[in-house]
Amino acid sequence: MILIIDFGSQFNQLIARRVRECSVYCRIEPPSMSLDEIRSLSPQGIILSGGPSSIYEKNSPKIDTGIFKLGIPILGICYGMQFMMDALGGKVQKAKRREYGFAELSVKPRQGLFKGLPKTTPCWMSHGDSLATLPKGFVISASTENTRIAATANKRKAFYGFQFHPEVEHTPKGIAMIRNFLFEVCGCEKSWTMRSFAKNAIAEIESTVAGKRVILGLSGGVDSSVAAMLINKAIGKNLTCIFVDNGLLRKDESAQLKLRLKKHLNINIRFVNAKKRFLSALAKVTDPEKKRKIIGKIFMDVFEAEAKKIKDAEFLAQGTLYPDVIESQSVFGGPSSVIKSHHNVGGLPKKMKLKLIEPLKYLFKDEVRLLGKALGLDGDLVWRQPFPGPGLAIRIIGEITSRRLSILREVDSVLLEEIRAGGYYKKLWQSFAVLLPLKSVGIMGDHRTYENIVAIRAVTSKDAMTADWARLPHKLLGKISNRIINEVRGVNRVVYDISSKPPSTIEWE
Ligand code: XMP
């Protein structure tokens, strides 16, 4: 495995993803990790990430410099390189000119991490400090016009440093450099596949659970379905899943999910119909945070009541993914500010005195889909777009009534039909409709109409942390709009949301 030390770079997850794309397992850990903990992981290589700090700042993140004596190959990126150079006796200074964006990298000896690369190649820079002098034993291995020491190497010790970012797409040969580090320098093997992951995970779940009972909240989304399948393979009937219908699902979704989950997941599932409870608690509520809190609270109550019926349950399983784990252990102490109170079962384990199992907590979303495939999960479930826990409640701006729910369900159903028919469903991270609390004037068959407006949102994203609005063809957008206005009573205008995240978020509430 490769250990990535997180110095706070916004690109950390990208480093991890690049390593895993090379079929090598890696973990991101904070710099507070001790030498003993590092030794116990036996990493074959360490990558020190970039970060926003300058090594001369008082509170800049630091790791025990004993790592340079472990005999493990190390690659420092940007701040990571500056930290290594400073620790080993080099000198870092404020760059004369800050450098952001593209630069042409001239590679000196085309060996080591630059093996097989052209003499010059574009790279992506983002730094305010740069190296003035190198520690003993290091040579300059690449330069750009503005940065003399753009890359450095100490071949004997297998220490390498890049001032640029090899992990971003704007450094097109970056993946080749990372590959060289993994396979030529660290001697890694391509052993990280979802099959090998599943085998180990199943064995681990089996020994952790040791004959006790596990409960899991199944939402019908890919994460909880894959977690359920994995746990089921490990402990079979000792797993009980609970599916809560909150009345905020899409058209026919509850019935379809029931069928699909039963058919494809040969698992104990309890279906709980709590529609009335949710909808009456939400009556007249318009504030987005209030809606979220109400839904979260009722979900917990319903889930807890159902779970109590399962005798001897000791564990609660969750489909937590790696981005959430990284976020909560980041160098700067976890999520910076609460933008939205996400609906999850976070508070349940404590309240119910259950131990937590999170079998997907080291996986990225795309890996979860691959794992689902490897486990034989039905394609429809594997490729399902994410759907938020609070469901349509946060896509109806303003009051939630059964009439407004039914309008949005019809609109959403037309939209998804067209997105699928156009071949866009899998290409998009999410595509959905939002019902606005506004009406507008229209004309239909010589009559004046005064009806609802819906917004269409379609985004591309890798992990929902950032997202871009999808450039859907005008023809497809035209067809969607036309069908919605013609087929759904109560809507006379369709608009398309062209905002990216940040500064907008994916959902409207
Ligand atoms: P935002 O709107 O914050 O959404 O950009 C990011 C991703 O999270 C989903 N989302 C949720 N998922 N419970 C969930 O399980 C929630 O409360 C929730 N709110 C937003 C959203 O659909 C998007 O994929």
Image: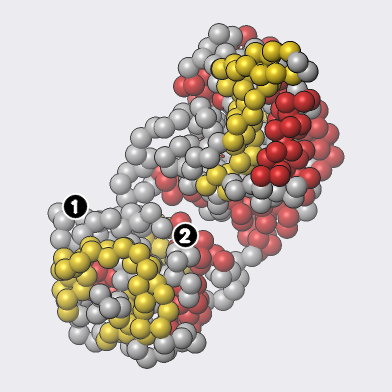
Q: Are marks 1 and 2 in contact (CB under 8 Å)?
A: no
Q: Earlier in the sequence, mark 1 or mark 2?
A: 2
Q: Quadrant of residue 186?
A: bottom left
Locate residue 302, reporting x and y percent: 63, 19
Disc 2 residue: CB within 8 Å of ligand 1: no
Decide which of 128, 484 is in the foreground and name it.
484
Residue positioned 60% across, 48% down in the render: 471
Vertical side of 360 occupied by 78: above or below? below
* Residue at 27%, 65% in the rendered image: 99
Residue in the image at 61% along x and 41% along y: 458
Q: Residues within 10 Å of mark 1 (few under 14, many from 20)?
A: few
Amino acid type assigned to the residue bearing label 2 in the image: Leu
Name the residue rendered at 60%, 18% in the picture.
Answer: 440
Numbered disc 2: secondary structure:
helix
For the image, the number of numbered tags is: 2
Residue 61 percent across, percent down from the top left: 25, 56
Spot occupied by residue 37 in the image (x, y as percentages of width and height): 37, 60
Does the beta carbon at disc 1 come under 8 Å from ligand 1?
no
Q: Looking at the image, is 351 positioned above or below residue 505?
A: above
Query: CA gap, disc 1 to disc 2?
Result: 25 Å
Bin the neighbour count of mark 2 within 10 Å (Cα to Cα): few under 14, some 14-19, many 20 and up: some
Residue 33 appears anywhere in the view: no
Front of the two marks 1 and 2: 2
Nearest to the observer: residue 348 or residue 218: 218
What amino acid type is highlighted by mark number 1?
Asn
In the image, taking residue 422 as reference, residue 62 lies left or right, namely: left
Which colour assignment does the render follow?
Answer: secondary structure
The image quadrant in which ligand 1 is located: top right
Q: Which residue is mark 1?
A: 59
Residue 14 is marked as: 2
